Image (spheres, coloured by chain):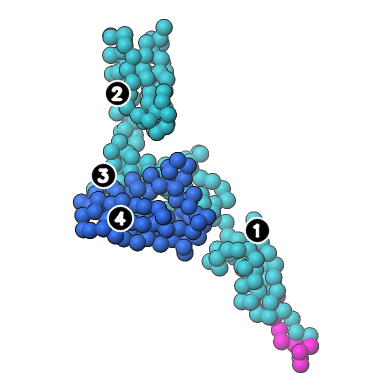
Chain colours: A cyan, B blue
Amino acid sequence: MISVEKSGKTVEEAIESAVLELGVDREKVDVQVLETPSKGFLGFGGKLAKVLVTVKKVDASAVAREFLQKVFDTMQLTVTVEKINKEDHVIFDLRGNDLGVLIGKHGQTLDALQYLTNLAANRDADDRVRIILDVEDYRKRREETLANLALRLADKVKRRGERVSLEPMSPHERKIIHMALQEDHRIVTYSEGDEPFRKVVIALKR
Amino acid sequence: MKELVEVIAQALVKNPNEVSVTETGDAESIVYELRVAQEDMGKVIGKQGRIAKALRTVVKAAAARENKRVTVDII
């Protein structure tokens, strides 16, 4: 934690010079007054104000929530945000009417907003946090859809003996495909191509 | 929607006060010109334009709701 001790003729003056030295905004610090100033007598024995100014710890998930709220306000969407704490990440589950706009094609918009939220949350954060955005269990439903697709395609590969390549997907979605088929001993899966067009290939094991 | 571009850009940069967005174009197709401090250019563009792409995706989604087409240029 960064803090600095400063003196000045008044408390406000002392804070001002501390904030200047720390190079942060006034709202982002906590102030502890160590000594209040006194005038003394005829210019003698006067005491300066002394303050301890500390940069506030930034709570990344609070920043994230605030960011999302602002985004939804400007989009004129009424969204309830529920925060779910997990071991190594935080899920924000978004609920409201007509939130398809936040999901987009194959979750593209949701992924984009999630990426921006992570950047915004961690800009000034002391402890990084990984944030997952979900809209009414969309991610879970998409996961099931992808796993089912993987199983269906694996059957096709076995019947025809030809490999199948899927459409380009995000790393997270590719992982779902790999996981869905890792128990299948007749099938191998691997990814090829470069981001953002990297895709999974399902083939017979030789 | 102009505010949306501002809100997102301000959340990403070091100097939120230097974010400005101007709007040009007609009723159906709008161009937003986003300006940020020189040192913040990387924060709104990102490696291989990844951040810019995400920003455009979100703004376009908001625009689609109002049946508008938007472009975001970073200047």
Q: Give the number of the mark in front: 3 or 4.
A: 4
Among the 4 quarters of the image, the one containing residue A36 = bottom right
Q: CA distance from mark 2 to mark 4?
A: 39 Å
Which mark, residue A149?
2
* Label 1 sits on residue: A2
Please, what secondary structure does the residue beneath circle 2 have?
helix
Question: Which numbered disc, 2 or 4, marks the residue closer to the eye?
Answer: 4
| Dominant secondary structure, magenta | loop
Residues rendered magenta in the picture? A34-44
Is label 3 on the same chain as label 4? no
In this picture, residue B72 sits left or right of residue A26:
left
Q: Chain of mark 3?
A: A
Q: Which residue is mark 4?
A: B31
Q: Is residue A85 visible?
A: no
Q: What residue appears at the point 40 percent right and 62 percent down from the top-left corner?
A: B20
- What residue do we see at 37% from left, 10% from top? A204
The amino acid marked with disc number 3 is Gly
Query: Badge 2 sits on which subunit?
Result: A
Residue of label 3:
A100
- Farthest residue, direction top: A206
